[in-house]
Every structure is written in C-alpha cells, then in structure tokens.
C-alpha cells in the first residue's frame, strides 16, 4: 500500500502484495512534518501493522478511520491514501465491490492533487479482473501501460505481468508470452516474492494454454510457495487450487489430491468454510482415484472438523 512520500514516514510505507510500489517513487509533493495529523498517522500505522499480520478485517476498520479523519480535515491526499489502502484490505477480504468503490474514491481525490495515479490504476485493474470484468481490467491496464511508457520500474513489470495474464486468459498466448518475457527481463535475479508469484501464475497459464499440464502445475506450485513466503495466504489457496486442477488434468491424482487438501485446510483456517468444504470434496475424489489412504484419512479428519462448525 502507499502513503505519503515522506522520508520520516518510512515505517508507514504500506506495500500491498499486488503493488509493491515504493513510496520513494511517488510524485506527490512532500508536506511539512507539522502539517501531518497525528491521529491519521496512528490509524494508518496501526492499519499497516494489522495488514502485515493478516488481520484484514481490523486493518480495513483502521484504514476506514483514517479515511474519515482525512475527510474531516479536508485533506484530499490523506483521503486518497487511506482509500487506496482500505481497498487493498477489502480485496484481501474478498469484498471486491467495496474495494472498487474505495479505489474510485482514491482516484477522484488523487487527480486534483497530481498524486501517483499509476498505483491506483494497477490495483483497480487487478480488482476488476477479480470481479470478473476482464474487459475493464484490460482497458485500465492498457491505460497504465501508456502512462508508464519508457519506465522500467517495478510498476511497469507488474503491469506487464497483469497484461500478460489477461491476454493468456483471453487465449492470446503469443501476446502473453511477450509480456512475460519483457517483465522477466526487467525483474533481475531476486524479485520480490509477490512479483515472482505473479510471474509464476502467468507461466502456469501459458503452459496450460500450450497443453503442458505438468509444467503448469509446477509453475502454480512455485506461485503458491512465493505467496506463502510473502504471507499472502488467501492468494496461496487459489494457487494451490490451480496446481491441483493442473495435476488432475495430467492424471497425477495423488499430487492433485495433496494440493486440493492443502487448499481446503488453509481456507478452513481462514474461515472460508464453504470454499473449504468444496475443495475437500474435490480432494477426496482425487485421493480415491490415487488410492492414497493417508490422504483420505487427512481429508476425512478435516471434513469432520468442518462439520462441527
């Protein structure tokens, strides 16, 4: 997530899993320290801490308080920063419609202040895709790519990876591969885990389109590992699901059952119980096909725990 581009606010720099854009790159004008409001800063810092600990509901409440504080003070950029961060927390909660409303508010408040619109556009495009509106996601990411022309920073890398994923999902494999290659060339040897996860997801999608299910499953496994490293467990469940389905398509039933069971287990611990039940049923079917008694026992135990809730 982002906040003001202030050197003395380094602890308040908020990095969303999907963005990872450094505040130091912001074009916002740096205000005087005396102009900052202590209550706004306290809420933003506490919201960041809660987000980092995976307490997304608490994080969203704290960012909402910061948003109200910004409105009270009539400070457009404070409103935009809080709304942007609130959207990130809402996305982690799976409330994509609320996140969209927050992002539109961030965009409205940022424009008059000449704020860093690119970060908002990237998150907006990601959220539109998660909402199922791929047409809008494509429009926004193309707008972002035009804004970033000539830039070789992290934001452009992430925009290219998202553009590639949208192309892959639309069946435009050559375009997807081109975006992947350009992003990879700019990433370097040790990209941030969340960006590496996005690249792995795109690799997996391309592999699936090319009929290479095992390669796709391995890419989704890498995606899940990177997301686990980054502490983004909601997205990790989705990556495990993708890996499980790719292994199933390759008739690797034991591996499919393992990934689907792990996805169900994590989803259940995240209180996504309905999703966990569905995943466990899929895992059970794959485990039966594989003949793995151990996996069947683990899945049955998880299902018993779920039945008590």
Image (cartoon, rainbow, N blue to C red):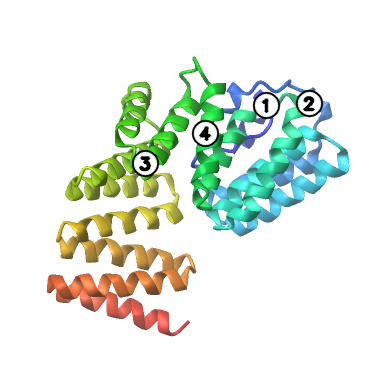
- In the picture, residue 186 is in which quadrant? top left
- For the residues bearing labels 4 and 1, Cβ distance under 8 angstroms: no
Q: Determine which residue is flagged by label 3.
A: 197
Q: Determine which residue is flagged by label 4.
A: 141
On residue 19, which mark appears? Answer: none
The residue closer to the viewer here, 217 or 40, is 217
Between the residue at mark 3 and the residue at mark 1, the CA separation in whole angstroms equals 31 Å
Q: Which comes before the other along the chain, label 3 or label 1? A: 1
Q: Which comes before the other along the chain, label 1 or label 2? A: 1
Q: Determine which residue is flagged by label 1.
A: 8
On residue 33, which mark appears? Answer: 2
In the image, which is nearer the foreground, mark 3 or mark 2? 3
The residue closer to the viewer here, 51 or 303, is 303
In the image, which is nearer the foreground, mark 4 or mark 1? 4
Q: Which comes before the other along the chain, label 3 or label 2? A: 2
Q: Residue at x 38, y 43 (%)?
A: 170
- Kind of element beneath mark 1: helix
Between the residue at mark 1 and the residue at mark 2, the CA separation in whole angstroms equals 8 Å
Q: Is residue 285 left or right of residue 196?
A: left
Q: Is residue 148 above or below residue 170?
A: above
Neighbor class of circle 2 (other Cα within 10 Å; few <14, some 14-19, many 20+) is few
- For the residues bearing labels 1 and 2, Cβ distance under 8 angstroms: yes
Q: Which comes before the other along the chain, label 4 or label 1? A: 1
- In the picture, residue 264 is in which quadrant? bottom left
Q: Which comes before the other along the chain, label 4 or label 2? A: 2
Between the residue at mark 4 and the residue at mark 2, the CA separation in whole angstroms equals 34 Å
Neighbor class of circle 1 (other Cα within 10 Å; few <14, some 14-19, many 20+) is few
- Kind of element beneath mark 2: helix
- For the residues bearing labels 4 and 3, Cβ distance under 8 angstroms: no
Q: Is residue 46 visible?
A: no
Q: Residue at x 56, y 29 (%)?
A: 143
């Amino acid at each position: 997530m982002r906040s003001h581009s202030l050197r003395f606010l380094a602890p308040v720099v908020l990095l969303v899993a999907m963005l990872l854009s450094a505040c130091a790159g912001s074009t916002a004008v740096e205000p005087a320290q005396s102009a900052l409001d202590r209550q706004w800063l306290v809420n933003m810092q506490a919201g960041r801490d809660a987000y980092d600990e995976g307490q997304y509901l608490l994080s969203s409440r704290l960012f909402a308080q910061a948003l109200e504080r910004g409105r009270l003070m009539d400070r457009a950029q404070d409103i935009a920063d809080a709304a942007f961060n609130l959207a990130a927390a809402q996305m982690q909660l799976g409330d994509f419609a609320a996140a969209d409303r927050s992002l539109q508010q961030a965009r409205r408040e940022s424009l008059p202040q000449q704020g860093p619109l690119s970060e908002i556009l990237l998150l907006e495009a990601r959220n539109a895709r998660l909402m199922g509106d791929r047409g809008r996601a494509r429009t926004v990411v193309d707008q972002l790519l035009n804004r970033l022309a000539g830039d070789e920073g992290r934001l452009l890398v992430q925009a290219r990876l998202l553009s590639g994923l949208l192309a892959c999902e639309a069946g435009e494999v050559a375009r997807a591969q081109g975006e992947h290659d350009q992003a990879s060339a700019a990433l370097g040897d040790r990209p941030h885990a969340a960006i590496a996860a996005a690249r792995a997801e795109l690799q997996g999608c391309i592999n699936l389109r090319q009929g290479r299910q095992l390669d796709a499953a391995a890419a989704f496994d890498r995606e899940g590992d990177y997301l686990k490293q980054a502490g983004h467990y909601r997205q990790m469940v989705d990556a495990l699901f993708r890996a499980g389905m790719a292994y199933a398509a390759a008739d690797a039933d034991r591996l499919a059952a393992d990934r689907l069971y792990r996805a169900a287990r994590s989803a259940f611990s995240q209180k996504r119980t309905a999703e966990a039940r569905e995943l466990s049923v899929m895992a059970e079917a794959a485990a039966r096909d594989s003949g793995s008694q151990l996996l069947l026992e683990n899945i049955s135990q998880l299902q018993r725990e779920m039945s008590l809730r």
